[in-house]
Amino acid sequence: MTMQFTVAIDGPAAAGKGTISKAVAKDFGFAHLDTGLLYRAVGFKTLQLEPDAITTDVAVDLAKCLTPEDLTNDSLRTGDVAQAASRVAVIPEVRDVLLEFQRTFAIRDGGAVLDGRDIGTVICPSADVKMFVTASAEVRAERRFLELSAKGHDVERAGVLADVIARDKRDSERETAPLVAAEDAVIIDTSDLTIEDAIIAANKVVASVFNGK
Ligand code: DC
C-alpha cells in the first residue's frame, strides 16, 4: 500500500525553513525537496551568460535542461546566485517548467516535505500540512551573514540585509506565485526561537495531522 503525505513549508529567505524542513523530513522519514535549489540552479546558469542574452526563452531552456547534478553544485549558496534565482523565479514560463517535477515529488510514496515560496499556495494547495516560517528581516539577515561568513564568504552585514530586503520585495511582489502564506498555513515566527524550539514547534504541527491519519 502506498503512503502519501505532503508537508508544504514556505517563507522568506533565511527564516529557517530549510533547517526545519530537513529536520521534519528526517524525524518522520519523509523525502525532502528544497525547491529554491531548482531556481538557484537556473539562476546560476544565467550568470554564465551576458545579461542581454537572458531572454524568457533562454531561461526556459535552462530550466528544461536541469540535471540532478546541477542541484548539488556548491556554488548555488552565494548571494549572487540567490538574486539571480529570484530574478528567474519572476518568469511564469520558468515556474511552469519546474512545476511538474515538484508536484510529482510531493506525492511520492513514503511522504514528502517541500520548502519554498509557493508550495502551499500553488504547487501543493491540498498539502496535508502547510506551514509558513518567517522572522524579521534583521534577524534573517544576521543569520545569513553568520552563515556566509562561516563559509568564508567576504560579506558585510548591511549588504546582506539589503539583499534580503530586495529578495523579499521581488519574491512577494511578483505577479505569478508570489511569496504569501496560504490561508490555512500555520505561521511559525522564528525571530525569538532557537532552531531547536522551531523544529519542535514544526514537528508538533506535523504530528497532529500525521498521527491522526
Ligand atoms: O529558498 P531560496 O532562498 O533558496 O530561494 C531562492 C530564490 O528562488 C527565491 O528568492 C525565490 C525563488 N523561489 C521561488 O520563487 N519559489 C520557490 N518555491 C522557491 C524559491
Image: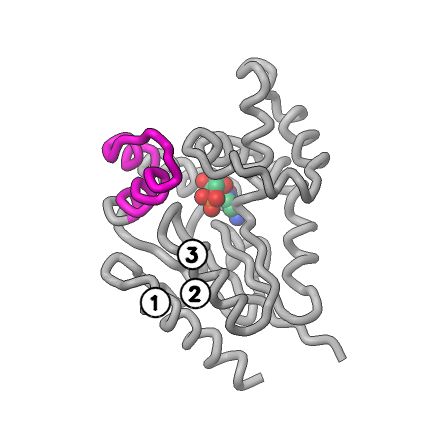
Does residue 146 show up magenta in the picture? yes
Residue at 46% from the left image edge and 81% from the top image edge? 208
Which residue lies under the disc numbered 1?
Answer: 196
Badges 2 and 1: C-beta atoms under 8 Å apart? no
- The amino acid on which the numbered mark 3 sits, given as a three-letter code, is Lys
- The amino acid on which the numbered mark 1 sits, given as a three-letter code, is Glu
Residue at 64% from the left image edge and 48% from the top image edge? 99
Q: Nearer the viewer, residue 48 or 162?
A: 48
Asked if residue 32 lies left or right of residue 117, the reply is: right
Kindly report the distance in space between the C-alpha atoms of the residues bearing marks 2 and 1: 21 Å
- The amino acid on which the numbered mark 2 sits, given as a three-letter code, is Ala
190 over 80 or under it: above or below: below
First reached walking from the N terminus: tag 2 or tag 3: 3
Tag shown at residue 89: none
The image position of residue 86, as x and y in percent, is 47, 35
Residue at 32% from the left image edge and 69% from the top image edge? 197
The image position of residue 156, as x and y in percent, is 26, 31
Kindly report the distance in space between the C-alpha atoms of the residues bearing marks 2 and 3: 14 Å
First reached walking from the N terminus: tag 2 or tag 1: 2
The image position of residue 209, as x and y in percent, is 50, 79
Asked if the residue at label 3 sits under 8 Å from ligand 1, the reply is yes
41 over 50 or under it: above or below: below
Please identify the quadrant where the N terminus is shown.
Answer: bottom right
Tag shown at residue 185: 2
Tag shown at residue 17: 3
Q: What segment carries the magenta color?
A: 140-164
Q: Residues within 10 Å of mark 1 (few under 14, many from 20)?
A: few
Of the two numbered discs 3 and 1 in the rendering, the one whose residue sits closer to the viewer: 1
Of the two numbered discs 2 and 1 in the rendering, the one whose residue sits closer to the viewer: 1
142 over 131 or under it: above or below: above
